[in-house]
Amino acid sequence: MNESKESDRHNSPSLQNLPSNAEFQPINNAPDANLSKRQQSVLQMQQTHGNSAVRRMIAQTTDLAMNTRYRAEEDESGQVIADRMRPVQREGDAGAPAPAPAGDAGAVPAQTVTPFPTIAQIRADATVERERTADWTAGQSDYRERFGWIMWDRSSSVFSVTGKATGTEDGVTPSAMPADSGTVFRVGEYHQHPPLRPGRDGSRFPVGPSQADTDGANAAGAPGVVRDFTDRARTTVTDYNYGPNRRT
């Protein structure tokens, strides 16, 4: 080592800017027996390589509290910028996924549940329409109202009709409400207001769902559809929805 380098190691003012907890002492001619092994190592590095090397070693110390290694940045000339520190990825972490936020460990994604079909979807189903048409055809002959519960299999989206009941010319009493079973759910109901028997006064019979029909569907928590006429002259057939739009 030449004299200028030796002088730089002893007298450089940058040494005074090192962190207050730096574990080294000003240069002495010989190691102090009272210093720890780490302090002696730091002192030896300072004597051999100068303050810049000591600063880099201190800056590379692992911050145990943060479990993150830091290193000091240098400017273009190689001079250490003591006040600017930046994190460095720990060895073995390349490509490793970021840790999950606290409280998310083992979280199971919420499952999506298919909603119950709407009354429009129920009416559009071919099976439901076939059953309703058959009951309407039968009512044109005997003038009796008919009722059915509409079921739906959530796993296959298949509709079916169960619990069909036949009433009188003035009304029908629904059969017992079917229970849900596995993936099969009750999703609606239907009934028919067939033509009146000849000789009956049509003006005395309103068309569309009655208040009792609507109240019953609301109580059951599922929609209904009734086939009837557009007016009391009973010349044009139509369908009326009643109750909620879909099962609640």
Image (spheres, rainbow, N blue to C red):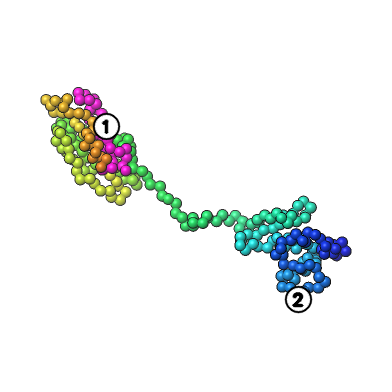
Mark 1 secondary-structure assignment: strand
Q: Quadrant of residue 2?
A: bottom right
Q: Nearer the viewer, residue 198 or 155?
A: 198
x and y, in percent, of residue 199 in the image: 11, 25
x and y, in percent, of residue 71 in the image: 69, 58
Under mark 2, the amino acid is Ala
Q: Quadrant of residue 134?
A: top left
Q: Is residue 161 visible?
A: no
Q: Are marks 2 and 1 in contact (CB under 8 Å)?
A: no
Residue 229 falls within the magenta-colored stretch: yes
Mark 2 secondary-structure assignment: loop
x and y, in percent, of residue 143 in the image: 15, 31
- Residue that protrudes farthest toward the left in the picture: 199
Q: Nearer the viewer, residue 177 or 128?
A: 177
Q: Which residue is mark 1?
A: 240
The N terminus lies in quadrant: bottom right
Under mark 1, the amino acid is Tyr
x and y, in percent, of residue 208 in the image: 23, 31
Q: Earlier in the sequence, mark 2 or mark 1?
A: 2
- Residue that protrudes farthest toward the right in the picture: 3
